[in-house]
Image (tube, coloured by chain):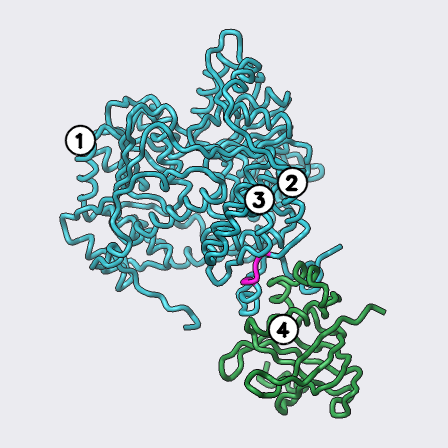
Amino acid sequence: MGNFESIGSARMSGGGVYFLQGNYIVEVEKAFQMKSFKNADLVIVECKIVESDVPERAPGTRASWVPKINPESMGSIKQFLAAANGIDPSDDETVNKEITPQVAELSFVTDSPLCGTKLGLQCVNVKTKAGGDFTKHVWSAIPAE
Amino acid sequence: MPSVLEKLLAKTGHSTDFKSNSKIGQIFRQQGVADSKELCRIVDLPRRVWTEDSIFAADVTDFFKLPLGTMKLRPIQAIALSELHDYGGLFGSIKVGAGKTLLTALAPTLLNSKRPLLLIPAKLREKTKRDFAELRKHWQMVDEIRIESYEMVSRAPKPLYCEARNCKCTQFVGDTKCVCQHDLGDHAAPSILDMYAPDLIISDEASHLANPRAAVTRRTARYMRQHPTTRFVALSGTITKHSLHNYHHIISWCLPKIMPLPRHWPDLVEWAFCLDERVDPMQQFAPGALFKLMNGEEIEQSKLGFDDAISAARKAYRRRLTETAGVVATSERYLGSSLSIEVVEPKYASKKVEEAFRDLRENNVTPDGHPVADPSATWRHAREFSTGFFYRWTPPAPKEWLVARSAWAKFVREVISHNRTGIDSELQVAQRFPHEDVAKAWKNIRDTFTPNSVPVWFDDSVLKYAQKWMTDHPGIVWVEHRAFGHKLSEMSGVPYYSDGGCDELLRPIEEADTSKPIIASIASNAEGRNLQGWHENLIVSLPPTGTICEQLMGRTHRDGQKADEVSVEILVGCIESWDGLMQAKNDARYLYETLGQEQKLLHADWIIPDDDEVRARKGPRWHKPEYARNNE
């Protein structure tokens, strides 16, 4: 088998496309862990936008959420995992009971079991303590139809 | 309703014990053990605290003893029998030497069992028979208690005849076929458990069932699953080595309705990652929701730091476990003899030991130039070198033989780990997969070489030290290696008790003259024997496991010991032995914190060098090469 057998199905990388401020319904296409060029641990969640109120991120386009794996972003990651598994992220008791380290480890892998899951996403621009811009991602479960 | 984890596992096809070490998992783990329905169930289980009551013991004694019997039950035995009666099962973490044999003898009488089965280590079979014969003079015992060894249960019996249709022939070719060439794999004979169909299983020295992957554990588990009404009694002084996984399954057989451990596997894994000894620090869970088991004092302790929090969680867990009805654990301190342990570094007369260690550390070879393959072989050889010899295969094994053996062993491990068809031993794998390439390759080459281990001596300093020790002390010299035991016996004329606890003339160790020294094999005698006639011990090579140390010292430091002090001298000649000793102490701390049982290694008076001083010693005996991790 040659080195480029899979080139036909590969998607070209044009740099990161991130979510802009607005409301979305997205479908998870990939969810995995990797290291950045600066050796930071990252979670990558690649999504296809299904519905959107942001013209620059129209339905059918793709965008990624890339939180660092550190204690500060664990809340967001936990919220994402809860929403992706159909749990209301505000239900602390259920979230703490169900979203365990094993769930996190199983979720962010190649061929993640979360692929195909639809989620609600609200992105809000906030200021960091240092004065920089930061897009806060708020994930929510979509009730089963 | 399945949990999120179960749904994900079903989607991905993983099992629940998948290896996990990702960064995200580590950060989650710091948040601690999750709250769960199982934790709530365990918190809500009723608690009971028992105290030793000699009047109650006398009442129970009257119930069981024969009119002419003179023996009496100890309070702990009476409590254990009472709980067995009330709850139909018993999980007894009862200290070494507290009288477990009598419990095994009376349990069938108490439960009116028709087919009781007593499981014991093979080396204790004859001793147990002798003990039972004596006990029958004092107590009401059922007519027949079948005694089988764990080794016998784990052995796959050959069928009496081939069960293939229209065959019935009784002659077999090798392990896999009858003379008519029917494959025996499809007609494997039932195990002893299936044939005898016990209604009560008593597991003495239940730590032999600790390994969930061992054939004997798998068979017992299968039998208990298929016959859930079978009652189970588990007794051991050292029921766990370092993990909840060592006895989770056993306690589920003993007390299925009031089990004080999580039944849900992912919950158990989290508890174990928090409470177990030998957990990778990066994998260790904080106690988290386990605070629900803690009392005020433990909660305060848990605020002091991570290690204190783990210690507090272990204490809380221990109280929960030992206060569950049906769990009887001894916790009293040893009030009789004191125990002193001294660590001694042997003085080697020649430089050959240092040279052997230098070859091992720098060139990974034995003194005869044979390469040492892996870290476990290095560890094994280092312990041999420190006693002045090493084992080698003579002649050495052909490379093809080693490769075929290794491939076959890997295949067997994989089949046993993953099959769902009841295969749990090497023989069964051979019977079921005779046509696999790896099986054929191994079968073709297996008999071309028979390993012949020969000891090669290069220093007799330790031998002479042990010989001199025996002239000064009428005690027990404990040896790990058969070669050392035989050589020392040959030099000194002192009998060496090894296989089955017997010497060369097949005299049992219990009948040896206690005014003279003896040499005892650790593997054959460290469990189940009453050797309180001696009070001085020399351990030539100490196994690095807390449970074995506890058992070994419990042979002489036990109820009935008349001397004021039991002394133990441990020879530590290299860093591997020192690390083993430290690990044994850590294991003992874990056992004490989770089961509440006083451990001899913890309460003994130690004469021991400082850890830093030992690690600062010069020379190849005290320094292992540093191995870099793959990603460093």
In three-dimensional space, the C-alpha distance between marks 2 and 1, rounded to whole angstroms, equals 55 Å
Q: Earlier in the sequence, mark 1 or mark 3?
A: 3
Q: Which residue is mark 4?
A: A110
Quadrant (top left, top right, bottom left, bottom right) of the N terminus of chain B: bottom right
Residue B472 circle label: 1
Colour chain B appears in: cyan
Q: Which residue is mark 2?
A: B45
Residue B210 appears in the figure:
yes
**Amino acid at circle 2:** Leu
Q: Is residue A81 above or below residue B208?
A: below
Q: Residue at x 17, y 35 (%)?
A: B468
Q: Which chain is green?
A: A
Which chain is mark 4 on?
A
Looking at the rendered image, the disc whose residue lies closer to the viewer, 2 or 1, is 2
Which chain is mark 2 on?
B
Q: Is residue B9 above or below residue B506?
A: below
Please state the extent of the stretch shown in magenta in the rendering: B29-33
> Relative to residue B595, is residue A16 drawn left or right?
right
> Relative to residue B525, is residue A69 drawn left or right?
right
**Amino acid at circle 4:** Thr
| Whether label 3 touches label 2, CB < 8 Å | no
